[in-house]
Image (tube, helix red, strand yellow):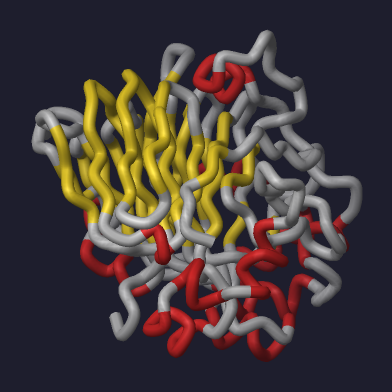
Amino acid sequence: MTSPSKLAANQPPQFYRGGAAIAALRGAADGKEFGPEDWVASTTTLFGQEETGLSRLPDGRWLRDAVRADPESWLGAKHVAAFAGSTALLVKLLDAGQRLPVHFHPSNSFARKHFDSHFGKTEAWIVVGTSGDDPRVYPGFRESVDPATVGEWVREQDGAAMLGALNSVPVKPGDNVYIPSGLPHAIGAGVFVVELQQPTDFSLTIEWRDFLQSPEKGHLGLGFDTALQALDTSARDPESIITRTGATDESIVELLVPGAAEFFRADRLHPKPSLALDPSFTVLVMLDGQGTLKTEHGGDLALAKGDTVVVPYAAGQAELSGELTTIRCRPPAPGA
């Protein structure tokens, strides 16, 4: 496989509302009320599912199966040496039509022990749109919290206490938030993000009442006593994990704090008038404008606002040109 491919919308069912911003970006007629996530270039399934969540290539194959069949063409030899046949990346468009519940994600080591997975779920949010009067995110506890206190909040389902203990940060397009594993967090209504994450669907939801059907869906079958062992109850300065890049007008803008590069890489690209891009497995999300992606071995691809594109390593050196703005998402550099 050497040619970049445009990907259709892929919106597996979710428990919360949203999707209008995704529809507007893609130029669709309307958003699904419960279609708040579009899984882009996904080789990951919803937790406990066989196929739901996977992306299809234009030829009808699951991207997962295509990558497994020819991992070096898709990912490059060095990536395969580090991550075998995994892309090591999941990209989503996430449009929060309501506040998400307080939740967190396991580390690699916790996921290996309890989910038999090489990957936990560290993630990051690239804010690309907001709506409403007060769009906010809630990353980490403002002050350290006794784990016993958190356990009591979970037993009582005291959502007000959980949310009230978190940092509350207003956001606007150009803001970017890194969410390491274990960090409790929520996204407020009206926040539209491009999300990068490790390729799993492990969400441990401590505020499950009024959101999920049962506590089991909150702790994923582990029991909350076990699940809470993965929670970071320490204080977090939000300024240590947030970058604000809206006023930066460079051709290539690195979006995330340096520590995120161990898990994924994200840039905003704005050709002036063109940009050379090195070979890599890449996911592109077109935010605005139109242009062309020319690849050494995969030909040319016309791009426009709302397109989502997967680029295999074997496409080779590439050139992005035109009046456009895109988010480039990549897995960690091999050896990082």
Q: Position of residue 286 (x, y in %)?
A: 40, 31
Work out which quarter of the rendered image holds the C terminus and state it.
bottom left
Vertical relation: 36 (above or below) 213: above
The residue drawn where x is 72% and y is 66% is 65
Please give left or right for residue 74 compared with residue 287 in the image: right
Could you say which is closer to the camera, residue 199 or residue 68? 68
Could you say which is closer to the camera, residue 2 or residue 223? 2
Residue 139 visible in the shown view: no
The residue drawn where x is 34% and y is 30% is 170
Residue 62 image-quadrant placement: bottom right
Q: Position of residue 258 (x, y in %)?
A: 22, 65
Vertical relation: 86 (above or below) 245: below
Labels in figure, total = 0
Could you say which is closer to the camera, residue 187 or residue 166? 187
Q: Position of residue 137 (x, y in %)?
A: 44, 38
Work out which quarter of the rendered image holds the N terminus and state it.
bottom right
Residue 49 image-quadrant placement: bottom right
Please give left or right for residue 21 compared with residue 272 in the image: right
Residue 179 visible in the shown view: yes
The residue drawn where x is 34% and y is 80% is 334
Could you say which is closer to the camera, residue 267 or residue 298? 298
The residue drawn where x is 19% and y is 37% is 245
Vertical relation: 334 (above or below) 96: below
Q: Position of residue 230 (x, y in %)?
A: 59, 76
